Amino acid sequence: MKEILNEVKNMVVKQISVFIENKEGRMKKAINTLAQENINIRALSIADTTKYGILRLIVSDNEKAIEALEKDGFIVREDDVIIVAVPDEPNGLNTTLAIFDEKGINLDYLYAFVSSKTEKAIVVMRLKHMDEAIALLKDSDAHILEKKDIEDL
């Protein structure tokens, strides 16, 4: 049982979310803060409203990133996400999403990127039922990435 829990834990990646006022220069300041600390951004997404944006990041060093961003006055939160490699072709993502749809599991959000080192699209997903989602992905032989896998992309 402990092995299964450790395996699931390794399949959950920590993403940081940075709350940014919707003002000129704030995004650059956040990105610059990370650059000054030599933190590599592996993936990012931004969702915005009229007053603020949420910058979601997969970075090389969460602890260092959070400390630097908070020191610079940003509100930062850490969230669990699942990262899956899917075929970089039409219907590649749809096949993965169908796994959740069949079981009624809703995605909170997702964002994706393509790496020059792989022939796969890399999809970052946030779901309410992470353990169940991981089990479904494993049962379908999906390629779930761990944090160490992301560092190599």
Image (cartoon, rainbow, N blue to C red):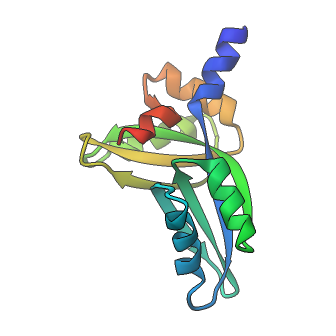
Which residue corresponds to the image point at 43% horizontal and 34% vertical from the top-left?
149
Could you say where residue 71 lies in the image, as x and y percent from the top left?
74, 68
Q: Nearer the viewer, residue 50 or 97?
A: 50
All told, the count of numbered labels is 0
Q: Quadrant of the N terminus?
A: top right
Which residue corresponds to the image point at 60% horizontal and 82% vertical from the top-left?
26
**Residue 49 appears anywhere in the view:** yes
Could you say where residue 122 lies in the image, as x and y percent from the top left?
39, 45
Could you say where residue 151 lies in the image, as x and y percent from the top left?
43, 40
Q: Nearer the viewer, residue 112 or 40?
A: 40
**Residue 107 appears anywhere in the view:** no
Which residue corresponds to the image point at 56% horizontal and 26% vertical from the top-left?
136
The answer to whether residue 33 is above or below residue 59 is below
Q: Quadrant of residue 24?
A: bottom right
Q: Nearer the viewer, residue 15 or 144?
A: 15
The answer to whether residue 111 is above or below residue 85 is below
Could you say where residue 83 lies in the image, as x and y percent from the top left?
50, 40
Which residue corresponds to the image point at 68% horizontal and 81% vertical from the top-left?
52
Q: Nearer the viewer, residue 65 or 5?
A: 65
Q: Residue furthest bottom?
A: 24
Side of 57 relative to 40 (left or right): right
Q: Quadrant of the C terminus?
A: top left
